[in-house]
Image (cartoon, grey):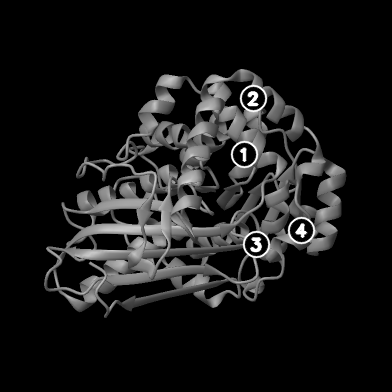
């Protein structure tokens, strides 16, 4: 049996995943194959990645029999096709039936919720990990590492408020834009609204979220202001699922505790900029939901390959996620700060390809007994609950991320 299958390998992000796995320092320890619809694009990519002919698979994912026969030959499937809500169900179904692990890059909360409801209690050996990229690994790892450090400093302390500020320079590809538009067009609005609930993906309900603000102070990261972050809604749901899984099934040393409350904002250098960003973000969300002509215009723009950034430009992108987590009560425990920074890469594509690749390698190269929740019956996990410090360590060893955790000595309460 081969190790890793990349579906959608010839897409924008799929190529990056292929290149990363092809020239990884541990390349001799695993095998991988690529699959897509276009044979000529596959052959070109395989030549670049130095893959043999038997590692190339032309596949129509709507052909369930062909899809199932291919997936049966692998331990882990990376789904980089996108459009998960409308085209991903058959892929996950096949993985669950065959006991194959599944990873994707979904930022689509309705998709995540659908898969959790359908497969979380499935009688299968599969581990399903959703949102293995920019959404939502930086946020999830920051909280997980901050909580772990607090627990090392103060045994059995409960966790209270956890805040993350995101600063980024990002790009948008054709596939990302089309997937986002599909979400607003194909998912019933009632389902979209349900998925905005902070614990929509969690097996248990937690504390009510903090009141949303257009502008918030970021004294806890050394200055600046926070604004509304649309992607933060996705990240919050994933972080809260990690909390819920650890609370429900994790060892006492892993569970965050009942007082955990998560908030995420976008970093701005001034209160005026933060206010403007919040208002624009809210307006964009409203227009995408309620104004079909706006979606039509964006779809026309997205139907050109010219919207894709140049691969060379991705090295100029950046992301810094800064999390501060407090104990509950906070009076006698210094908070902990974790920073997750990209190095010479954007987070949405180049960084994302590294993140999901290292998730796959964590599953392939790590004995299951060394992973955090290998003993539970849930099939749909998050990156931190499935892989824990194994993933953090692998990302630190790559040349693309700087992940640091420290006790905050100055007063930021």
The residues tagged by marks 4 and 3 sit, at their Cα atoms, a distance apart of 11 Å
The residues tagged by marks 1 and 4 sit, at their Cα atoms, a distance apart of 19 Å
Describe residue 193's horizontal placement relative to residue 89 as left or right: left
Task: Tell me if label 3 and label 1 are in contact, CB under 8 Å.
Answer: no
Quadrant of the image containing the C terminus: bottom left
Describe residue 154's horizontal placement relative to residue 35 as left or right: left
Task: Tell me if label 2 and label 3 are in contact, CB under 8 Å.
Answer: no
Mark 4 residue crowding within 10 angstroms, few (<14) / some (14–19) / many (20+) = few
Residue bearing the label numbered 2:
294
Residue bearing the label numbered 4:
311
Instruction: Decide if residue 180 is in sight here.
Output: yes
Residue 59, picture quadrant: top right
Question: Residue at coordinates 53% horizontally, 43% vertically from top-left?
Answer: 106
Residue bearing the label numbered 1:
82
Choose between 99 and 240: the one closer to the eye. 240
Mark nearer the N terminus (1 vs 4): 1
Mark nearer the N terminus (2 vs 3): 2
Quadrant of the image containing the N terminus: bottom right
Mark nearer the N terminus (4 vs 3): 4
Residue bearing the label numbered 3:
317
């Amino acid at each position: 049996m081969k190790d890793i299958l990349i579906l959608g390998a010839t897409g924008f992000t799929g190529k990056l995943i292929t290149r990363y796995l092809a020239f990884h320092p541990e390349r001799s320890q695993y095998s991988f194959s690529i699959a897509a619809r276009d044979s000529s694009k596959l052959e070109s990519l395989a030549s670049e990645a130095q893959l043999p002919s038997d590692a190339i698979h032309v596949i129509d994912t709507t052909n369930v029999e062909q899809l199932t026969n291919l997936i049966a030959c692998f331990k882990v499937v990376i789904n980089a096709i996108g459009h998960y809500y409308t085209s991903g169900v058959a892929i996950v179904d096949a993985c669950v039936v065959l006991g194959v692990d599944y990873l994707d890059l979904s930022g689509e909360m309705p998709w995540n919720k659908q898969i959790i409801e359908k497969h979380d209690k499935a009688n299968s050996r599969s581990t399903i990990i959703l949102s293995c990229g920019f959404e939502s690994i930086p946020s999830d790892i920051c909280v997980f590492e901050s909580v772990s450090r607090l627990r090392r400093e103060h045994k059995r302390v409960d966790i209270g408020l956890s805040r993350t500020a995101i600063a980024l320079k990002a790009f948008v590809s054709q596939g990302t834009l089309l997937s986002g538009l599909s979400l607003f067009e194909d998912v019933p609005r009632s389902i979209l609204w349900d998925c905005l609930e902070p614990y929509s993906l969690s097996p248990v309900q937690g504390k009510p979220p903090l009141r949303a603000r257009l502008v918030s102070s970021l004294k806890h990261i050394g200055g600046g202001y926070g604004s509304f972050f649309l992607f933060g809604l996705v990240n919050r749901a994933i972080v809260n699922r990690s909390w819920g899984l650890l609370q429900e099934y994790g060892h006492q040393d892993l569970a965050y505790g009942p007082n955990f409350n998560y908030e995420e904002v976008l970093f701005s250098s001034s209160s005026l900029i933060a206010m403007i960003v919040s208002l624009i973000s809210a307006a964009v969300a409203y227009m995408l939901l309620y104004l079909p002509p706006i979606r039509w215009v964006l779809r026309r723009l997205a139907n050109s390959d010219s919207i894709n950034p140049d691969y060379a430009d991705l090295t100029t992108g950046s992301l810094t996620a800064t999390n501060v987590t407090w104990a509950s009560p906070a009076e006698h425990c210094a908070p902990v700060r974790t920073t997750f920074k990209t190095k010479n890469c954007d987070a949405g594509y180049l960084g994302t390809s590294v993140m999901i690749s290292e998730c796959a390698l964590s599953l392939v190269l790590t004995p299951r007994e060394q992973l955090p929740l290998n003993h539970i019956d849930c099939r749909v996990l998050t990156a931190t609950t499935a892989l824990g410090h194994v993933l953090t360590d692998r990302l630190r060893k790559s040349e693309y991320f700087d992940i640091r955790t420290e006790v905050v000595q100055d007063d930021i309460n």
